[in-house]
Amino acid sequence: MSNQSLGNKVALVTGAAGFVGSHLVAELKAEGYTVRAMVRDRGRLGMLDPAGIDLVVADITDRDALSRAFEGADLVFHIAALYREVRFPDSEYFRVNTEGTRNVFDIAQACSVKQVLHCSTIGVHSHIAHPPADESEPYAPTDVYQISKMEGEKIAFERLRSGAIGGAVIRPAMIWGPGDTRFLKLFRGIARRRLPLIGSGRVWTHWIYVKDLARAFRLAAEIPAANGELFIIAGNQPVLLCDVFTEIARCYGVRLLPVRIPVLPLQIAGRIVELICKPFGVEPPLHRRRADFFIKSRAFDCQKAARVLGFKAASSFLEELRSIAEWYRKAGWL
């Protein structure tokens, strides 16, 4: 597909001001698409570069606003979601992640959008008991975020498999890269020698560099064989959590703390803090899900993405980690 033909395609990205959305906008713009970036607040663009794109304000829970935003779009990349924040009631996750996805597909069909590329999550599997897992792994969500994303994914599949609209579903692994704030705490805690390893560290982690993920979304839109399919998108190899800690420490020239904290006390403390903070709408400093990071294995077989999309991560795990560590250092985020 030539850049000239892509220039005539209007690609709308929901959640364009977010971490993944902003990188996807940059990928599409660089590849010649006419990009329409959908944000909830024109004054909060995060890392999104507004140059050369059409900025529209809409919310996936507002069907009228979606209709205006989607008019004339050829394809929609549905990235927007409500991530894990304890201050929100459970109903809000379903309103955004489940019913918001239904809205996106309903309005896309009404506006004659040709494709919707839906962003799900490997969280719909939660823990992989017998790694590596592939796209046939059963659903096994364990928290409201994961359940609401699973239900949204089911809606996406129902529409795609029925032939009502084209597109694909992407389940990204653990997303990291320049500008990420989610795993900044991990890098900062190790760099400052404030974060010890919790648990044994003998659990698998599987990462995807955000720029590679953006490329995978684009490929899924461009390759006809991807239509109606699901793809797990992850890096070239899973890595043990203890090795992640070791390599981050090496990047910053520090030694890991010599102590290890058992997981159970962290889980109990997280539960107590959540119960105290949630009624007041306050985001707690400690969550149960942070303990989950140290005890759940996530490792995946991505042969389907390689075979159908020709997708392969551009760099090794170590190259990705070092580039992120250096970006944080230069940005002064540590």
Image (cartoon, rainbow, N blue to C red):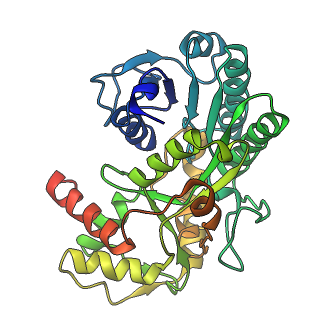
Residue 334 in view of the camera: no
| Residue 139 horizontal side relative to residue 241, left or right | right
Q: Residue furthest bottom?
A: 258
Q: Residue furthest right?
A: 162
- Which is more toward the observer, 16 or 1? 1
Residue 58 in view of the camera: yes
> Which residue sits at x=51%, y=50%?
216
- Which is more toward the observer, 3 or 246? 3
> Which residue sits at x=53%, y=86%?
202
x%, y% of residue 94?
71, 36
> Which residue sits at x=64%, y=10%?
64
x%, y% of residue 227?
69, 42
Vertical arrangement, residue 122 with respect to residue 68, above or below: below
Q: To which quarter of the image does residue 34 belong?
A: top left
Q: Please state, as top left, top right, bottom left or bottom right, where the C terminus lies in the image.
A: bottom left
Please state the total of marks drawn on the protein image.
0
x%, y% of residue 138?
80, 63
- Which is more toward the observer, 306 or 190? 306
| Residue 297 horizontal side relative to residue 90, left or right | left
x%, y% of residue 56?
45, 16
| Residue 18 horizontal side relative to residue 66, left or right | left
> Which residue sits at x=64%, y=30%?
115
